[in-house]
Image (cartoon, rainbow, N blue to C red):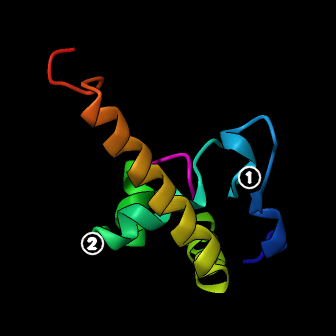
Amino acid sequence: MRTGSVEVGTLLDREPEIRGGRPKIAGTGITVSRVVSLYRAGVSPEEIAMEYEHLSLAQIHAALAYFHANAAEITEDLAAAEASAERWGRQGRLAPGA
């Protein structure tokens, strides 16, 4: 039984004031990069949906499709986040118990 269709383009958005304008799942703060990092770590789309119960499987697949269509952009975003985490770690700001 069909209750209506969803335009795939409405599943993702960008808002300058949220996550620096990076692509994210519409209506949430979950970035495409976050979904991709989990997926690359071996977490299945279904497992991501179980972890983030407010996300639908369609939203997760939309994020992965965006990544596959824009791999350079998302790979660059992931590399920048990793470099930032390394800088913070070297500065001792992420020390256990801090």
How many C-alpha atoms fall within 10 Å of the one at disc 1: few (<14), some, or many (≥20)?
A: some
Amino acid carrying mark 2 in the image: Gly
Residue 61 got which mark?
none
Horizontal side of 1 relative to 74 (left or right) equals right
SS assignment for the magenta stretch, majority:
loop
Q: Which of 53 and 41 is in front in this view?
A: 41
Question: To which residue does mark 1 refer?
Answer: 26
Residue in view at x 60 percent, y 78 percent? 72
| Left or right: 82 as drawn, with respect to 61 | left
Mark 2 element type? loop
In the structure shown, which secondary structural element does the residue marked by tag 1 occupy? loop
Residue 17 visible to the viewer: yes
Question: Does 81 sit left or right of 42 as displayed?
Answer: right
Residue 34 position (above or below residue 61): above
Q: Residue at x 84, y 73 (%)?
A: 7
Quarter of the figure that contains the N terminus = bottom right
Neighbor class of circle 2 (other Cα within 10 Å; few <14, some 14-19, many 20+) is few
x%, y% of residue 90?
26, 35
Residue tagged by mark 2? 42
- Specify the quadrant of the image occupied by residue 91: top left
| In the image, farthest residue toward the bottom | 69
Is 53 part of what is drawn in magenta?
Answer: yes
Q: Give the range drawn in magenta.
A: 52-56
Residue 6 in sight here: no
* Residue at image coords 28%, 67%: 41
